[in-house]
Image (tube, rainbow, N blue to C red):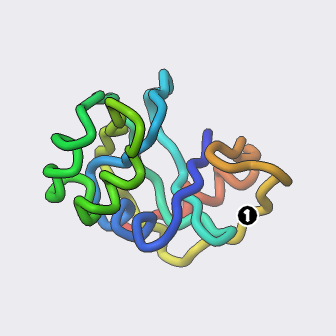
Amino acid sequence: MKGLIVRQPWASLIVSGKKQWEIRRTKTRYRGPVAIISQKNVLGVVEIVDVIGLPVEEMAARVEKHCSDPATIKSYGEGRGVLYAWVLNGAKRLKEPLPIRIPRGAQTWVKIPESVEEEIWKSLEG
């Protein structure tokens, strides 16, 4: 399993199911389950099901999907024609945050060790 590093408050919004798009400057080819990691803790699991490229202005207007202030999105996309929405589905929160060791230098993706992955699946709510 892969882990995706996301800052707060967006990580909590993702695992609650409110944030359906994670906005990034690049595409990802990966589709499937990812652990959402913030502040050295796994908070939950979500599935990346698609990637949509949109002009920055149009992306900024889709607040209901990405839960970010339009000005923040415009600033993030400054100098770029397009931003990418990583489309998320099936968010599940862990009963309690699970501490995880993040390798030095990791900024976006983390390889989740098999033993930690087992713990994640056992700890999901519902």
Q: For this view, does 75 lie left or right of residue 98?
A: left
Q: Is residue 112 left or right of residue 67?
A: right
In this rendering, the answer to whether 39 lies above or below 58 is below
Q: Is 65 on the left-hand or right-hand side of 116?
A: left
Q: Secondary structure at mark 1?
A: loop
Rendered residue at 69%/45% (across/down): 110
Q: Name the residue at 39% across, 34% down.
A: 80
Q: Position of residue 54 (x, y in %)?
A: 24, 32
Quarter of the N terminus within the rendering = top right
> Which residue is situated farthest in the front direction here?
79
Image vertical order of residue 68 relative to residue 118, above or below: below
Circle 1 packing at 10 Å, graded few (<14), some (14-19), many (20+), is some
Check the image and name the residue furthest to the bottom: 96
Please provide percent x and percent y for residue 59.
22, 43
Position in image of residue 111 (x %, y %): 71, 41
Where, by quadrant of the figure, is residue 119 drawn? Answer: bottom right
- Which residue lies at the image location 37% right of the left edge and 48% below the top edge? 22
Image location of residue 125, percent across then percent down: 40, 68
Q: Which residue is mark 1?
A: 100
Near-viewer residue (73 or 22): 73
Is 85 placed above or below 52 here? below
Which quarter shows the C terminus?
Answer: bottom left
Instruction: Name the kind of residue labelled 1 in the image.
Output: Ile
Q: How many numbered marks are there?
A: 1
Which residue appears at 52% of the width and 65% of the height? Answer: 7
